[in-house]
Image (tube, rainbow, N blue to C red):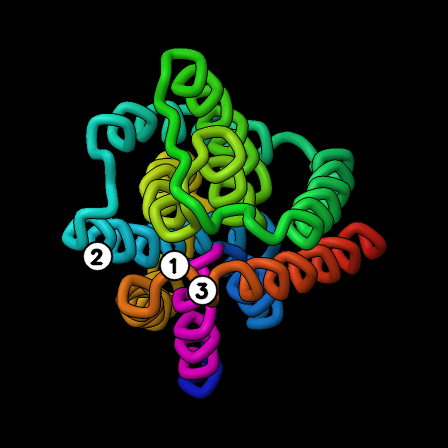
Amino acid sequence: MEPEVLVLLVLAGLVAGFLDSIVGGGGVITLPALLAAGLPPHLAVGTNKVVGTGASSIATWNYARAGLLRRRLAWSLFPLSLVAAMVGAAAVLRLRGEFILAAVMVVMVVLTTYILLRPRFGAVDRTDLSGGTVLALAAMALAAGFYDGLLGPGTGNLLLFGFVAIAGMPFLRAAAHGRVLNFGSNVGALALFAWAGSVDWVVGPVMAVGTVTGAYLGSRSNIRAGAAWVRPLFVVVTLALFVRLAATYLTT
């Protein structure tokens, strides 16, 4: 691959990592960039997991250092997301995901509409970690992990929304916990794609330089600025993700 293309992938990764560490949605930038660089679809999806693993790991580290994680909860959900992503990755190597893509597009619209109609959503800490809530979070970890292994774009948005809606977390803490689960799903999916030989081990690490840098800057900015900008950024990124998924759906 030409050096100038690799430079553009690093720059795309920088922007994607920044956004992904705050509200998710980095895949809406990285996956199309890899496809545009000439990687075949399965290879692009697998290589994208190298990129995502780097970004989610550094963001998780930053949020953990800032004391935003309920560690027992986060690390108990981590393996569920990891295993579910392995199942999803195994499925995508054999199946086409048009139906799931359409379902996620509907979910994107519902999430955005809900947040626009609920001005206080994610603004107040109403964290509830009772037994029923933890079970619901476990189900979310499995569903989001499977989807991340199967397709990917939008996983971070779904996790952020889920931690606020299910557990009553404020946006900033929800972003932190979402990164842990996204880290798990990226690791699980990457393991399957690597085993299947569907990873470009040159392009992936090069682009990951950009996403790791972006994720470090994004998570640090989020910690310092608080949750004030998470809500509008979530809406913008989710709408952009919907447009991208719709374009993908219409061309498949």
What stretch of residues is rendered in magenta?
Answer: 6-23
20 is within the stretch colored magenta: yes
Mark identifier at residue 228:
3
Q: Is residue 85 visible?
A: yes
Structural distance between the alpha carbons of marks 3 and 1: 15 Å
Mark identifier at residue 62:
2
Q: Which residue is mark 1?
A: 21
Task: Identify the residue shown where x is 85% and y is 54%.
Answer: 250
Q: Position of residue 233 (x, y in %)?
A: 54, 65
Q: Are marks 1 and 2 in contact (CB under 8 Å)?
A: yes
Image check: 27 left or right of 200? right
Precedes in sequence: disc 1 or disc 2: 1
Q: Amino acid at mark 2?
A: Asn
Precedes in sequence: disc 3 or disc 2: 2
Task: Identify the residue shown where x is 56% and y is 72%.
Answer: 37
For the N terminus, the quadrant is bottom left
**Mark 1 Cα within 10 Å, few/some/many (few <14, many 20+)?**
many
Query: Which mark is nearer the camera, 3 or 2?
Result: 3
Precedes in sequence: disc 3 or disc 1: 1
**Mark 3 Cα within 10 Å, few/some/many (few <14, many 20+)?**
few
Mark identifier at residue 202:
none
Q: Nearer the viewer, residue 80 or 249?
A: 80
Which is the main secondary structure of the residues drawn in magenta? helix
87 is within the stretch colored magenta: no
Q: Amino acid at mark 1?
A: Ser
Residue found at the far right of this picture: 250
**Mark 2 Cα within 10 Å, few/some/many (few <14, many 20+)?**
many
Q: Where is 132 relative to 107, above or below? A: above
